[in-house]
Amino acid sequence: MKKIHIVGIIVIAVAIGVILTSLKNTSTYADFNEALANPDREYHVVGKLQKSQPLIYDPKINADEFIFTLIDNKGVEKKVVLHKSKPQDFERSEQIVVIGKMHEGEFHANDILMKCPSKYNDGKQTM
């Protein structure tokens, strides 16, 4: 075999490995009920902050744990344990996406995405 054929086979093998790894790490959007039914699978859950429940974050005790309550798009309310520090302007977010798994009735998130209020209203910038 020529060296170019061996290099080609190695490149193809690496590409297949990368594709399989990326497919394994993908998660899907769901609600809390679906995440509860499949606790071993990672999900993106979209919802809104339940503002009547307390936000628990004490960086002196554990800087990488933030606890809050989220209401998903189907109205199911669950406690979320985010294994990161509390995001800036968290209370102002309009919509929250938590990424993680259900564990013992709580959603344990390893990442969070927030949709913050728009800086612009009717095409005019507000200050």
Image (cartoon, rainbow, N blue to C red):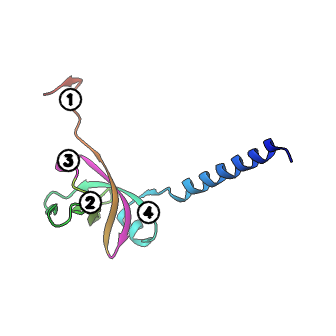
- Earlier along the polypeptide chain: callout 4 or callout 2? 4
The first of marks 3 and 1 along the sequence is 3
Specify whether residue 95 is painted magenta: yes
Q: Is residue 55 left or right of residue 108?
A: left
Q: Which residue is drawn at 22% across and 39% down?
A: 117
Q: Is mark 2 on a helix, strand or loop?
A: strand
Q: Name the residue under label 1.
A: 121
* Percent coordinates x, y for residue 60 in the rendering: 14, 63
Query: Badges 1 and 2: C-beta atoms under 8 Å apart?
Result: no
Q: Are the residues at dot 3 and dot 1 in contact (C-beta closer than 8 Å)? A: no
Residue found at x 42% / y 60%: 43
Disc 4 marks which residue?
Answer: 42
Mark pair 4, 2: CA separation? 18 Å
Instruction: Determine the image quadrant of residue 57.
Output: bottom left
At 25% from the left and 54% from the top, the residue drawn is: 48
Q: Distance between the residues labelled 3 and 1?
A: 22 Å
Is residue 21 among what the camera can see? Answer: yes
Q: Mark 2 points at which residue?
A: 71
How far apart are the two marked residues, 4 and 1, measured between alpha carbons?
36 Å
Q: Which element carries disc 1, helix, strand or loop?
A: strand
Residue for badge 3: 88
N-terminal-most mark, 4 or 1: 4
Q: Is residue 108 left or right of residue 29?
A: left
Q: For residue 108, what is the image quadrant?
A: bottom left
Considering only vertical position in the picture, is 31 above or below 89?
A: below
| Amino acid type, label 2 | Ile
Front label number (4 vs 1): 4
In this view, the residue in front, 86 or 117, is: 86
With respect to residue 87, does 68 lie above or below?
below
Closer mark to the observer between disc 4 and disc 2: 4
Q: Which of 115 and 25 is in front in this view?
A: 25
Mark 1: few, some, or many residues within 10 Å (few <14, many ≥20)?
few
